[in-house]
Image: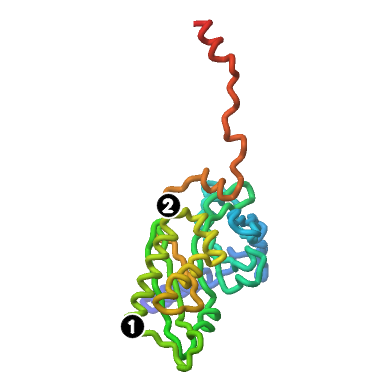
Amino acid sequence: MKKKLGANFSSTYCNTYTTNMAVGKNKRLSKGKKGLKKKVVDPFTRKDWFDIKAPSTFENRAVGKTLINKSTGLKNAADGLKGRVVEVCLADLQGSEDHSYRKIKLRVDEVQGKNLLTNFHGLDFTTDKLRSLVRKWQSLVEANVTVKTADDYVLRIFAIAFTKRQANQVKKTTYAQSSKLREVRKKMIEIMQREVSSVTLAQLTSKLIPEVIGREIEKSTQVIFPLQNVHIRKVKLLKQPKFDLGSLLALHGESSSEEKGKKVNAGFKDVVLEAV
């Protein structure tokens, strides 16, 4: 009797165990047919294209296009576009290959329809241009200064220059003494502070394109030591004032006439006085 009970108990236990295992192993019952793939959706169908517009300081205002996901729910596309920084070759903006070694950074400040209005954000030299300037038998002079413009933009300006062979020079090298280099550097900082602090950011951009500051440094330092290849190699934007839409629209030449007040009728004042 004991043996039979033991046999029955073990068999029922085994059956229960095996049935549980069978249910656990069959994992594809709830997943549907094998081989069915998820529908592939092109991600570009959910995106919008916007035109990037450069300030009117530059010759060509059409910079290019950028894209972003369409506005959905609480997520607005305009918020994602504001603050974007694009890097453009100055040769493309000016339509001249003479500026091909300089890169301009533009920052998106406002979204108007499908147009993105940008402002100047920085300037830099290409690496190959900087490498080509550095040569043997001459001294390199670098100077940088942090200046505030007339419209409260804080910029850091970097200048670079190289010593030049004098007329009828026999000596192979054109190395300058460290005392002379200090004098040149002091003069460079002085000129950069003077030229930048007295103008707005838009006016400074107009000075940077034709390299007015570089020529001024070269001319002023002739008395101390003759220089060549004098350039403003980098401009960094450190701080900007509170955003002003009116000044940005003026920079893009889009300040509409609708903003101006309508002309008041000349007889309006007299009519009011008589009624009172």
Mark 2 lies on a secondary structure that is: loop
* Residue sitting at x 66%, y 68%: 96
**Which-is-in-front pick, marks 2 and 1?**
1
Q: Residues within 10 Å of mark 1 (few under 14, many from 20)?
A: few
Residue where numbered disc 1 is placed: 178
Q: Position of residue 231 (x, y in %)?
A: 49, 72
Eyeballing the image, is 74 above or below 101? Answer: above
| Residue closest to the far front | 168
Q: Nearer the viewer, residue 257 or 51?
A: 257
Q: CA distance from mark 2 to mark 1?
A: 34 Å
Three-letter code for the amino acid on which mark 2 is drawn: Ala
SS state under label 1 = helix
- Where residue 272 sits in the image (x, y, percent)? 53, 10
Disc 2 packing (10 Å; few <14; some 14–19; many ≥20): some
Q: Quadrant of residue 31?
A: bottom right
Q: Quadrant of the N terminus?
A: bottom left
Query: Taking 260 as reference, is 236 above or below it?
Result: below
Which amino acid is tagged 1?
Ser
